[in-house]
Image (tube, grey):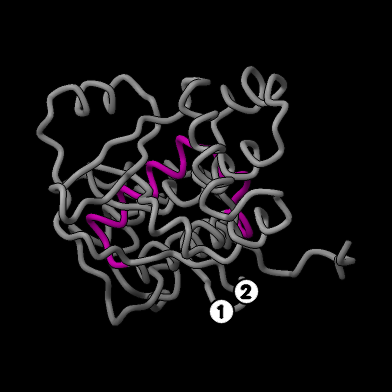
Amino acid sequence: MKNSTGLPARMEYSAIPNFYLNLVMPMVDNLEELKLSLHIFRVINRKKGSLQYASRSELLADPAITEGLKNCPQSLERSFDDAVSRAVKRGILIILKLGNESENEEIYLLNTPLNREAAESGEIKIASKKTDYHVAVPAEQMPDIFTHYEENIGLLTPLIADELRLAEQSYPEKWIIEAISEAALNNKRSWRYISRILERWLTEGKANGTYRQNNPTDDPSKYTTGEYQRFVQH
């Protein structure tokens, strides 16, 4: 077994549903199924858009997954398909095959009510068979809003992860990172406070790309916005 040198200073985190951790995982008795299920949560959690899924080709190209299945007595693909089948029978995943006989893509969705409804509608389409793979890389090379939130605000819950993904659709990533930093500097460690910063920057402008607490002390806007706003009559 390869020895670990310990955890790095900067790490990326993945959101795992508490339902799985508390109710499903204790019943999982197959190591390959457990490994693959956790990786699928990781991959899907990183996806954007209304349809969040992981494709078979994407997962088989992920070094973390292939490394975890390499010591199985069966071939990699056979071990992979067996682990997926177990997760499907356990009610965790939904398998869909998109495309035609000559060219198709097998994708996996979490077995949630919304995804079941979408799958049963028969109208799910993906833009292209080619998928952008999210391959694990050292965290030092991959600073992102999720890591930044964990390091400066607190635990990244599934609800907060969803809020961050929604924010990515409305604001530049740099803004979100800076808003998280400003919240930490003000010791206001909550998503509600961060979202208010972003809303203020969107409606009032973000002067010169700097934090508002760095504005000159004689800036009159400090009396009409922020903590003094409630004392001023317009």
Which quadrant of the view contains residue 203?
A: bottom left
In the drawing, does residue 27 fall left or right of residue 16? Answer: right
Give the amino acid type for the residue marked by disc 2 in the picture. Pro
Judge by depth and name the residue closer to the eye, 40 or 192.
Answer: 40
Measured from the top left, where is residue 123 in percent x and y? Answer: 10, 34
Residue at 72 percent of width and 22 percent of height: 26
User: Residue 138: which numbered mark, if any?
Assistant: 2
Count residues near mark 2 (Cα–Cα under 10 Å), then give few for <14, some for 14-19, many for 20+: few
Element assignment for label 1: helix
Q: CA distance from mark 2 to mark 1?
A: 6 Å
x and y, in percent, of residue 86 in the image: 54, 28
Instruction: Give percent across and percent down for residue 181.
Output: 52, 64
Circle 1 Cα neighbour tier, 10 Å, few/some/many (<14 / 14–19 / ≥20): few
Say above or below: 79 vs 147.
Answer: above
Amino acid tagged 1: Gln
Q: Give whichever of 49, 212 is nearer the camera.
A: 49
Q: Quadrant of the N terminus?
A: bottom right
Question: What residue is shown with label 1?
Answer: 141
Instruction: Please indicate, yes or no, whether residue 170 appears anywhere in the rendered image.
Output: yes
The numbered mark at residue 185 is none
Which residue is located at x 56 percent, y 22 percent?
A: 19
Q: Is residue 164 magenta?
A: yes
Q: Residue furthest bottom?
A: 208
Query: Magenta segment range?
Result: 150-172
The residue under the point 47% across, 20% down is 91
Residue at image coords 41%, 71%: 211
Determine whether the residue tagged by mark 2 lies in a helix, strand or loop: loop
Q: Is residue 126 magenta?
A: no
- Left or right, residue 7 beside residue 78: right
